[in-house]
Amino acid sequence: MLAVDTPVLVHNAGGDPVAPKIIQRGLQQIQDGTLQQRRNPDGKLDFYNNYEKNKRNAWWVGAKIYAPDPNNNDYRILEKDGQYKWVGPKGNVKGAGHFYGKLMNIPGCS
């Protein structure tokens, strides 16, 4: 595509969505050390286990799970070896809980 006489790169939709502000804030808190790893109801630290048996997500087994807002069950951040992914609401429906079937990139962090 050209803008006047200058070539311009155009990114078409269809890739991972831009990480929402709750994820961006959570990532900053993880990096600042102010967001602690999520704990399960039994008090044990929460780690990703790939119950969905998704081959693309197999490498992420054992990743730390963070809840950027403990009062919002729709979003989670995964961290493993300095790499990050995020998950959002199941079926993109607010209040439906998070869905680990699709791990999405955080621009600049994957």
Image (cartoon, rainbow, N blue to C red):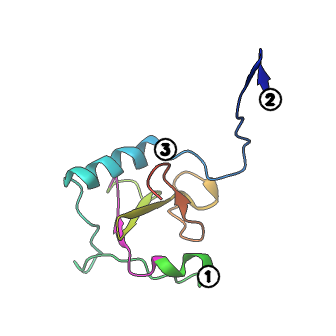
Check disc 3: other Cα within 10 Å, few if <14, some if 14-19, many if 20+: few
Relative image position of residue 49 (x, y in whole percent): 45, 82
Q: Helix, strand, or loop for circle 1?
A: helix
**Residue 102 got which mark?**
none
Looking at marks 3 and 1 on the same chain, the residue that comes earlier in the sequence is marked by: 3
Residue 12 appears in the rendering: yes
Mark 3 or 2, closer to the camera: 2
Looking at marks 3 and 2 on the same chain, the residue that comes earlier in the sequence is marked by: 2
Residue at position x 53%, y 84% from top?
A: 51
Q: What's the CA distance linking mark 3 and mark 2?
A: 28 Å
Which amino acid is tagged 1? Lys
Q: What's the CA distance linking mark 3 and mark 1?
A: 25 Å
Residue 59 left/right relative to 41? right
Q: Compare residues 60 and 98 and report the one nearer the observer.
A: 60
Mark 3 or 1, closer to the camera: 1
Relative image position of residue 19 (x, y in whole percent): 50, 47
Check disc 2: other Cα within 10 Å, few if <14, some if 14-19, many if 20+: few
Q: Helix, strand, or loop for circle 2?
A: loop
Q: Is residue 57 above or below residue 104?
A: below
Relative image position of residue 23 (x, y in whole percent): 42, 49
Residue 65 painted magenta: yes
Q: Tell me where the magenta segment starts and ends, as one range.
A: 60-69
Which amino acid is tagged 3? Pro
Check disc 1: other Cα within 10 Å, few if <14, some if 14-19, many if 20+: few
- Say which residue label 2 marks: 1
Residue at position x 53%, y 57% from top?
A: 105
Give residue 56's quadrant in the image: bottom right
Residue at position x 80%, y 29% from top?
A: 1
Residue at position x 70%, y 34% from top?
A: 9
Residue 59 painted magenta: no
- Say which residue label 3 marks: 20
**Residue 55 got which mark?**
1
